[in-house]
Image (tube, rainbow, N blue to C red):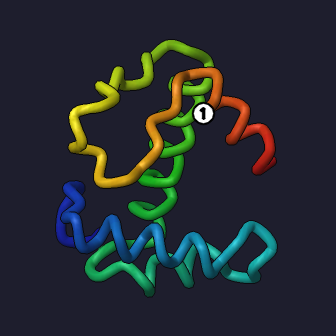
Amino acid sequence: MGSNSTWTAKQNKQFENALAIYDTDTPDRWHNLARAVTGKTVEEVKRHYELLVEDLDHIESGKIPLPNYKSGGGNNKGYKIMDDQEQRMKYLKLQ
């Protein structure tokens, strides 16, 4: 077992980067992911991935509302604020 079940911001970033490198077709994907995340075992990486998928499923099914970001005020630093429908359409185009 790894150090503990909590994940630091650094470990989450390592996990995200490793997911971008090791896709579902990668041989020994879970071992590669675990090696890329400091202090985590294969089992911990798999569980973290399962929780991520569950979270995405809840968000996509509407069980968790998307944040209601305020538009205007100049605080978005040039980023376009999308409404729920725009976000869903963008996601669908990525599939």
At which x and y percent is residue 23?
71, 72
Q: Amino acid at mark 1?
A: Gln
Residue depicted at x 44% and y 18%: 64
Q: Nearer the viewer, residue 76 or 31?
A: 76
Q: Which residue is mark 1?
A: 87
Determine crowd level at label 1: few under 14, some 14-19, many 20+ residues with C-alpha closer than 10 A.
few
Q: Secondary structure at mark 1?
A: helix
Q: Quadrant of residue 8?
A: bottom left
Residue depicted at x 18% and y 71%: 3
In the rendered image of this protein, does residue 77 appear above or below residue 32? Answer: above
Tell me: 62 left or right of 68.
Answer: right
Residue depicted at x 42% and y 53%: 48
Tell me: 77 left or right of 60.
Answer: left
In the rendered image of this protein, does residue 40 appear above or below residue 50? Answer: below
Q: Nearer the viewer, residue 81 or 18?
A: 81
At which x and y percent is residue 38?
29, 82
At which x and y percent is residue 92?
77, 38
- Please identify the quadrant where the N terminus is shown: bottom left
Q: Nearer the viewer, residue 91 or 54?
A: 91
In the rendered image of this protein, does residue 20 appear above or below residue 38? Answer: above
Residue depicted at x 48% and y 76%: 17
Q: Nearer the viewer, residue 80 or 61?
A: 80
Tell me: 68 left or right of 7.
Answer: right
Tell me: 62 left or right of 85.
Answer: left
Q: Quadrant of residue 60?
A: top right
At which x and y percent is residue 4?
18, 62
